[in-house]
Amino acid sequence: AQGDVPACRLTLLNTHLPHLSSNSTLVRYLARRIHAAAAATSCIFSGDLNPDKGKPLRSQFGAIFQCGATLGEETGALVTWDTANPLIRGKKCNPDADMQLDFCFLHQPNEPRPLLSRMRSSLLRREAFFLPGAPLSDHIGILTTFELRE
C-alpha cells in the first residue's frame, strides 16, 4: 500500500562557475547552500566549476569539501574538456587544458542510514560528443551512479 512507503527527498544543485575568475566567494556561498539543503536530505551538487589547473582541487573547493561533500571515486581523473574539440573558444583561455571542469559531489545528512550511497563517476561515451562536423558540446558528459538505500 502506498501509505507504507516512507517519503524520500533529494536535493539537486547545479551551477556553472565563471572561468578565469576568482570563485572563492561563490564556492563559500554554494557550500552554505549545500550544507543547508543536506540538513534534511541527501544533496547532489554538480556543474562546470572551471577550476584553475595550477591549483589542487581541495584548495579551490575547500568550503565544499569542508561541509561534508564527497566526490565520486573516479572523479579527479576525468577529462571533460578537450582542446581537440572544435567548439573550444580558442586555446587562449586554457592553453594546455585537457582537464576536468565538470564535477558531481554528494553530501549526506548525519543519519544512521543515508538515502544514497556508493557513488561512482565516469565519462559518457566520448565519441557521442564529437560527431564529425557537429560536436554536441565543448564538454564531455559525466555519468554519476548512486545506490538508493531501501
Image: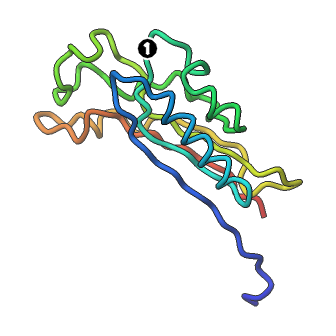
Q: Residue at x 23, y 20 (%)?
A: 84
Query: Front-most of 11 and 136?
Result: 11
Q: Eyeballing the image, is 41 above or below 8?
A: above
The percent position of residue 55, horizontal first and vertical second, equals: 51, 12
Q: Nearer the viewer, residue 137 or 43?
A: 43
Is 87 displayed left or right of 140 in the figure? left
Quadrant of res 83: top left
**x, y percent for residue 54:** 46, 9
Task: Give the residue displayed 59% in from the left and 58% down from the top.
Answer: 11
Relative horizontal placement of residue 68, taking residue 33 as reference (left or right): right
Query: Relative to residue 122, is residue 112 depicted above or below?
Result: below
Q: Residue at x 53, y 34 (%)?
A: 27
Residue 104 image position (x, y, % from top left): 54, 40
Residue 73 is left or right of residue 149, and the answer is left
The residue that disc 1 covers is 53
Residue 92: x and y, percent? 21, 13
Give the residue type that dot 1 points to.
Answer: Lys
User: In the image as oriented, which residue stretches furthest toward the front?
Assistant: 25
Residue 18 sits in which quadrant?
top left
Q: Please state which of residues 145 and 113 is positioned toward the viewer in this rendering.
A: 113
